[in-house]
Image: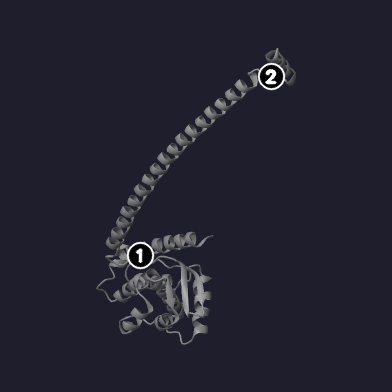
Amino acid sequence: MDIEQKQADLIDHFVKQASALQGSALCPLIAEATSNTSLFAFSEILAIPSVLQLEGTSNSVYLDVLRLFAHGTWSDYKRNAGCLPQLVPEQVLKLKQLTVLTLAETNKVLPYDQLMQELDVTNVRELEDFLINECMYAGIVRGKLDQLRRCFEVQFAAGRDLRPGQLGSMIHTLSNWLATSDNLLMSIQEKIKWADSMSELDKKHRKEVEDRVEEVKKSLSLKKLQTVSRPTLTSEGMRRSTLNLVE
């Protein structure tokens, strides 16, 4: 089963479970979802009415945890740790993985120093082991570790849940991209038309040259025939003609 299908199946599973629960019964489910090693998207769970109803209740911290895993990073957790439940190791790992995805959204070359600071990693060996074993092997990123330049070159990164207000920005970006693509397409079409017209002119010129060559060939052939058919005097004929003149 590929990663996308497994992700979709897990989302469907947790959405169905959460839709059937209310109040405090949702807390262990949220903890389970945010600890699952193969789940990296939470907006569908976050959108369930019963989950949103945790807002303002004694269990609202679990709604905050779900929002953290949907949109936040490890640094966000550290800043708000006093207001949130303590994370279990699986959740810590998951949040650090999600942090890498967030960093990869805006920069495809991630310096080791930045990654070590954001992930609370103390040395390069530990960082590279994390990127290889917990990120690349998990299929959420692909890239190249550049030890000489001390950076991680991101070639692919899975997308995270859209943050509030991010949809409008994404629509604007996609609209700009579409307009640029339309302009580029028009430019390409104009160049194709120009190339076609030049090709037609070239064909016409080539035909004119070929026709001219044929005319020259015919003219030369005709002159050759005329030269061949013209009577010529043999040496005997020339002798006789000379004798006649003498007589």
Q: SS class of the residue under badge 1? A: helix
Residue 25 visible in the current orientation: no
Residue type, mark 1 in image: Ser
Closer to the chain start, of discs 2 and 1, is 1
- Residue at 31% in and 67% down: 163
Q: Position of residue 179 (x, y in %)?
A: 31, 53
- Residue at the extreme bottom of the image, as rendered: 122
Q: Position of residue 45 (x, y in %)?
A: 36, 64
Residue 42 visible in the current orientation: yes
CA gap, disc 2 to disc 1?
109 Å
- Residue occupied by mark 1: 43
In the image: residue 150, left or right of residue 74: right
- Residue occupied by mark 2: 233
Q: Which image quadrant is residue 41 in?
A: bottom left
- Residue at 32% in and 72% down: 63
Using the image, determine if residue 137 lies above or below residue 215: below
Number of numbered markers: 2
In the image: residue 91, left or right of residue 171: right
Q: Position of residue 26 (x, y in %)?
A: 36, 70
